[in-house]
Amino acid sequence: MKNKKEFEPVQVDQYYPKIVIRLLEKILKLNSKKIVLFGFSDNMKWLVSLLCQKSIEVDLYDWRQKFINYDCGGKYILHVDNLKDDPDTFIIVCEEEINSLKNGISYLQKLGKNKINVIYDKSSPNLPFREEEPFKSIASNAQNRAISMISDTQLFDLIQFIKQTRKVEGDVVEFGSLHGGSGAVIAEAVKYFGEKQIWLFDTFEGIPVSKYGLDYNWNGSFSNNSFSEVRNAFKDLKNVKVIKGNIGETYKLVQNKISFGYIASDTYETVEILLKFLWSKLSVDGIICICDYGSFPNALPLTVFVDEFIEKIEDEVFTYRPDKFGIFLIKKKHK
Ligand SMILES: C[S@@+](CC[C@H](N)C(=O)[O-])C[C@H]1O[C@@H](n2cnc3c(N)ncnc32)[C@H](O)[C@@H]1O
C-alpha cells in the first residue's frame, strides 16, 4: 500500500460505478496494513481489479456461506468469522443492494470484532419503495396490475399502514380507486402481510355532480376510466371486491369492522359521509388515511371538514400530518 505522501489520484474511467470510485478513493487515502473487501458483488470485482492494477494487496471476505471459497478475479472469498480482530484492518463493505447491505452490517455488528475499522458507503438515495424488500416486490407486482396517479411516497405509506394494521380486526377499504393503482399496492401488501377482505370503490366513470357548490371544481373529473379493466386487474384475487357506483351509496355494503380505510375521493361531499362512516367502523389501532388532505387549492373544502371532524374526536385519535399533503388518523383505546 502506498503511503499518504505517495498518493496520486487515479484516473478512473466514466463507466465504473459511482460507488466503486468513492470506495477506491477512500481506500487510497488509507495508510493501512490490511485492506479487506467484504460482500461479494460486482463492486467487489471492480475493486479487486482496480486495486490489483495499483499493486495494493487485498483479502476478500463474506458473511454468506454461499459465497465462501468463491473465485473472484483469481482470489478466494473467506468467511468473515475467521478475520482477526485487529485495529490495522479496514473492512470495505462492497455490497450495495440495500437488503444485503443491511444484512452485512448486522452481521458485522453481531460479530463483535470491534477493533476492525469498517468503511461503508451508499451512493444512491434511500428509496425503499423501489429498492428495498418487501416494498420493492409489492410495488412491482402492483404496477403489473394497474398504474396509480399518486406518488411513490404516498404508495409507500399505504404499504406501511397495511403492515401496521395487519393484526387489527377488520376489512381494508379504499374509496376512490380510479384505475386501481393504489388499490393494487394495498392488495399486494395485504397478500404479503396477511389476507383480509379488500373493498375498492369508485364510479369508474368520474366524480358525480356533488350536492355541494364547494365541490364544483371536481364535478366530472377522472371520467376517462374503465370498470371492466379495473375488475380484470384483480380477477385472480378472491379477497378483492371492486364495487362500481356512487360511493355516497355503495359504502353501505361494508358491514364488517375496518382495520384500514383509505379515502381518495377528493370531494367535500364524499369525505363528509365516509369519514364519519369509517370512524364508526374502525377498530382500535386501525388507521384512516385521507389522501388529499392539505392538497391546496383543490382539496381545501375537505381539509376544512377533516379539521373540524378531528376536533370532535380529539381524545380518541392520534393524528399524523406529513409534509405537503395527506393526514393519518389512528384510533386510540377509549380511556
Ligand atoms: C384522485 S382519484 C383516485 C386516485 C387513485 N387512488 C390512484 O391511486 O390513482 C379520485 C377517484 O375518486 C372517485 N370518486 C370521487 N367521488 C366519487 C363518488 N361520489 N363515487 C364514486 N367514486 C368517486 C373518482 O371517480 C376518481 O376515480
Image (spheres, rainbow, N blue to C red):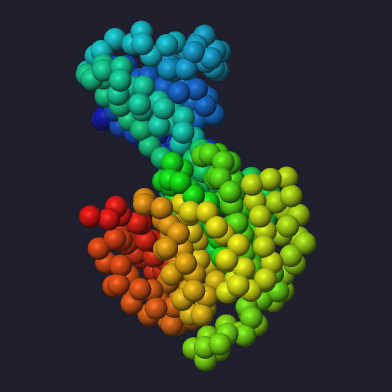
* Circle count: 0
Above or below, comparing residue 248 to residue 143 in the picture = below
Q: Which quarter of the rendering shows the N terminus?
A: top left
User: What percent of the width, then of the height, locates residue 286?
Assistant: 41, 53
Q: From the top left corner, tell me how far across and down residue 51 is, in percent.
A: 44, 24
The image position of residue 83, as x and y in percent, is 33, 11
Q: Quadrant of residue 305?
A: bottom left
Q: Residue at x 26, y 17 (%)?
A: 112
Residue at 49% from the left image edge and 49% from the top image edge: 170
Name the image quarter holding the C terminus.
bottom left
Which residue is more in the foreground, 34 or 216?
216
- Residue 279 visible in the picture: yes
The residue positioned 32% from the left and 30% from the top of the image is 119
Please provide percent x and percent y for residue 71.
Answer: 56, 13
| Depth check, front residue: 140 or 80 | 140
Dividing the picture into quadrants, the one containing residue 237 is top right
Q: Residue at x 45, y 23 (%)?
A: 39
Residue 136 seen in the current view: no
Residue 96 as seen in the image, left or right of residue 243: left
